[in-house]
Image (tube, rainbow, N blue to C red):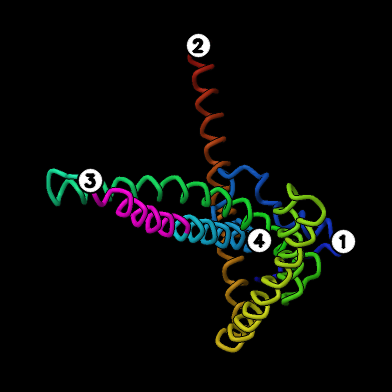
Amino acid sequence: MDFSNITNTEWYGRLKEVFKDLSVDREQYPETELTPEFRDWVTMTSAGTLCAGVAAGMNAARLEGERHIKENKNTVYKGVRHAQSELNMAAGRAFAQIGGRWTLYGFVLMGCFNALHIGASVVRQKKDALNVMGAGTVTGALFWIPYGLQGMATGAMHGSVLGLVGGVAMQAGWMLEDKVDPPADRAARKLVHDAEIEQIREERRLHNLRMQQATANLIDDLSSQIE
C-alpha cells in the first residue's frame, strides 16, 4: 500500500484524499485514477467474500449429501442416474442457500474489516500488525452486537486474536515485498504512472476543447445560413 499520494496532514484530510476520485466525473479521468487504497479494499473484500461463500457452500453441500444418503438409503430409485441426480440436487440446494448466505456475511464482514484496516493505515501512515489487530477487534465486536455486551466482548477478543495472527502474517509479507520490490522502484514506477495519467488528462482536455470549438463553429454556420 503506497501512501505517497497522501499529502494532507490532518487525519480527516488523509481519509478524504483516499476516496477523492470517487466523486469526479469518470468521463474526464481514466479508470486508473482510482486510488491504490480503494483498489486494495475492492480486491481484498472481493477475495474474502468469494472464499467465504465457496467454503461455506462446499461444506454445506457435503453435509447435506451425507444427510441425504443416510435418510434415503431405503428409497427405491429408478436407477443409479436417478439416485445421483437427487443427491446432486440436494447438495446443490444446500450449496446455493448456505453459500449465498455466507457470501453476504463475508461481504459485510470483509468490507468492514478492510475499510477499518485501510483507514487505520492511512490515518497512521504506517503498515503494521496493529492496524489489522484493531480492525479485527472492532469488526468482531460489531458482528456480535445482537448478543449484547458479553457477546461484543467475546467477538472483540476473537477478532483481536485473529487480527493479531493475520497482522503478523501480513507484516511478514510486506517485509518480503520490500525486499523483492524495493520502495524506491515502486516510487519510480509511480512517477512514470503519474506522468502517463497527466498526459491522458491533457489529451482529453485538448480533445474536449477541439470538440467545443467545432460545435461552436457548426452553430455559427447554421446561424449564418438561417439568416
Depth check: give the residue in front, 5 or 77.
Answer: 77
Q: What's under tag 1, amino acid-wise?
A: Glu
Considering only order in the chain, which callout, 4 or 1, is on the residue closer to the N terminus? 1
Q: CA distance from mark 3 to mark 1?
A: 69 Å
- Tag of residue 10: 1
Q: Horizontally, is 174 left or right of 7 in the view?
A: left
Give coordinates of residue 47: x percent, y percent.
51, 61
Q: Which residue of the protein is positioned furthest toward the left in this rendering?
A: 79
Q: Horizontally, is 83 left or right of 183 in the view?
A: left
Considering only order in the chain, which callout, 2 or 3, is on the residue closer to the N terminus? 3
Residue identifier under label 3: 75
Residue identifier under label 2: 226
Residue at the location (63% across, 55% down)?
109
Q: Horizontally, is 86 left or right of 115 in the view?
A: left
Q: Is residue 133 magenta?
A: no
Q: What's under tag 3, amino acid-wise?
A: Thr
Q: CA distance from mark 3 to mark 4?
A: 49 Å
Q: CA distance from mark 1 to mark 4?
A: 21 Å
Give coordinates of residue 52: x percent, y percent.
51, 58
Q: What's under tag 2, amino acid-wise?
A: Ile
Residue identifier under label 4: 114
Residue at the location (22% across, 45% down)?
75
Depth check: give the residue in front, 50 or 181.
Answer: 50
The correct choice, above or below, for 68 with respect to 227 in the image is below
In terms of secondary structure, where does tag 2 sit?
helix
Number of the front mark, 2 or 1: 1
Considering only order in the chain, which callout, 4 or 2, is on the residue closer to the N terminus? 4
Quadrant of the image occupied by residue 138: bottom right
Q: CA distance from mark 3 to mark 2?
A: 86 Å
Number of the front mark, 3 or 2: 3
Q: Which secondary structure dominates the residues rendered in magenta?
A: helix
